[in-house]
Image (spheres, coloured by chain):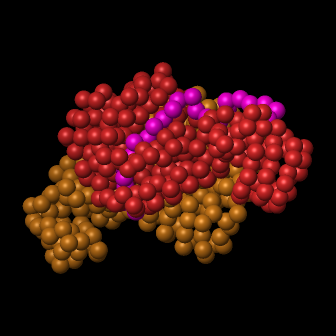
Chain colours: A red, B orange
């Protein structure tokens, strides 16, 4: 059954009204017609619907059932990623969306090489959100992860530390990920460095804010491998893989 | 300290003799000289050495210590990957090498779209092995994973099933990865599909050969995401992350 993500304004009582590109896609590309079933998703809720009425640019669907999306992880994982070079952010967003991250927040740490200006950062954010949406559709998520940024390190630490558990990946040592008490958490923040990792001062700030330092073992992971591996492992520990 | 992988013929008693490109690299690029220390790796063994003598194209190093590489996982993970489209194999090799796979074997399943001829497959293998070598160097591995292929499905199942534990990733259901008894295994084979997954017949063959079907949860992972996530999770369960 086709699945679409919808905005708040598409929800009208017991009806969902689709306009614009999605309406054209439903009518012309998918050739759907009155009586056909479509699933819509918004913020982790799945709406099963039946098409009631179609015009050339609007589709009216009656909600027959609504329930929390079964594909959304119970654990809300917020990935705090120091901005990497080149287009590695895009790979991270795509893969961590598939793996179930609820939110991906980019920030600048001392050793970040890529430091886009405000205008360029805004353009990147729009592109990144689009990548998250595509990956969410492809992987059958019930929610599109929110992509935020680009925060300063201090802003990132402050918002990261209010989670049930906050993990700070640090190449100079810490607990093993398998020892972290993730299974009872509802929200989890993970902070991961860019190419050069974090410095001692940043580690101290994160730990002072309540984060647990985590060490990922003896092999040196590329900066884009680390968030993908960590998201997969945390989702597995949380019983979501 | 610089690290190099060596072939068998570089090992001569209590000496390691480097020739060719690596010798030039040691002398000219790294500007190393007699008395400097170099670490060499071969098949999971690390050789600590001191440079004894250098000519323009040879470097003689005395072995001062040899020990199993501390960065090599105890668990030998063999990844059996159905050949994906485009250059996804390269991403899989790079990431799974960083994460600690011992061996990556490509094979053709019924739904593989990419089916290179013998000549093209041989060219790919050379390129793939080079990618594994680069990733092994970068991540500080003590061993370069062996890249094999391209096997038929039956050949792959036969060699895959002789491991202590063999896991067959199947989107239509199976055990969760967290339930698989990986921690006591010394060797583990994991079989993962290409874009279209496996068909029922392939699942039956793999299970008849002793594999356990594994289900990776409700989110649909892209074919290149799956081996990266599975390698990370298995290494974590094995205490290697």
Image position of A221 with respect to A72: above or below: below
Quarter of the image where one finds residue A166:
top left
Between B154 and B182, the one nearer to me in the picture: B182
Question: Residue A47: image x %, image y %?
Answer: 74, 36
In the rendered structure, the answer to whether residue A168 lies left or right of residue B188 reads left
Image position of B89 with respect to A220: above or below: below
The number of callouts visible is 0
Q: Is residue B163 magenta?
A: no
Q: Residue at x 48, y 35 (%)?
A: A77
Q: Residue at x 16, y 76 (%)?
A: B55
Point out the residue furthest to the left here.
Answer: B35
Point out the residue furthest to the top here.
Answer: A184
Question: Residue B161: image x %, image y %?
Answer: 63, 43
Question: Residue A141: image x %, image y %?
Answer: 63, 41
**In the rendered view of the protein, which quadrant contains the C terminus of chain A?**
top right
Q: Can residue A225 be seen by looking at this rendering?
A: yes
Between B123 and A115, the one nearer to me in the picture: A115
Q: Is residue A82 magenta?
A: yes
In the rendered structure, the answer to whether residue A143 lies left or right of residue A231 reads right
Region in magenta: A63-86
Q: Residue at x 70, y 35 (%)?
A: A46
**In the rendered view of the protein, which quadrant contains the N terminus of chain A?**
top right
Question: Residue B183: image x %, image y %?
Answer: 49, 30
Between A208 and A47, the one nearer to me in the picture: A47
Between B34 and B167, the one nearer to me in the picture: B167
Q: Residue at x 18, y 74 (%)?
A: B28
Q: Can residue B188 be seen by looking at this rendering?
A: no
In the rendered structure, the answer to whether residue A88 lies left or right of residue B162 reads left
């Amino acid at each position: 059954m086709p699945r679409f993500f919808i905005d708040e304004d598409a929800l009208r009582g017991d009806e969902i009204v689709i306009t614009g590109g999605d309406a054209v896609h439903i009518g012309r590309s998918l050739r759907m017609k009155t009586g056909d079933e479509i699933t819509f998703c918004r913020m982790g809720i799945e709406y099963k619907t039946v098409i009631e009425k179609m015009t050339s640019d609007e589709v009216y669907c009656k909600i027959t059932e609504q329930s929390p999306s079964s594909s959304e992880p119970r654990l809300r994982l917020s990935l705090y990623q120091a901005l990497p070079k080149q287009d590695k952010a895009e790979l991270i967003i795509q893969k961590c969306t598939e793996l179930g991250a609820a939110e991906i927040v980019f920030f600048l740490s001392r050793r970040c090489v890529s430091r886009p200006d405000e205008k360029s950062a805004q353009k990147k954010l729009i592109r990144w959100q689009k990548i998250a949406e595509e990956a969410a559709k492809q992987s059958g998520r019930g929610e599109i992860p929110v992509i935020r940024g680009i925060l300063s390190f201090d802003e990132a630490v402050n918002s990261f530390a209010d989670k049930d558990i906050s993990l700070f990946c640090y190449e100079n040592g810490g607990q093993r990920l398998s020892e972290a008490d993730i299974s009872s958490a509802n929200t989890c923040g993970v902070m991961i460095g860019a190419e050069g990792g974090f410095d001692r001062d940043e580690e101290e700030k994160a730990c002072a804010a309540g984060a647990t330092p985590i060490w990922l073992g003896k092999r040196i992971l590329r900066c884009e491998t680390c968030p993908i591996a960590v998201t997969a492992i945390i989702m597995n520990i949380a019983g979501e893989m």
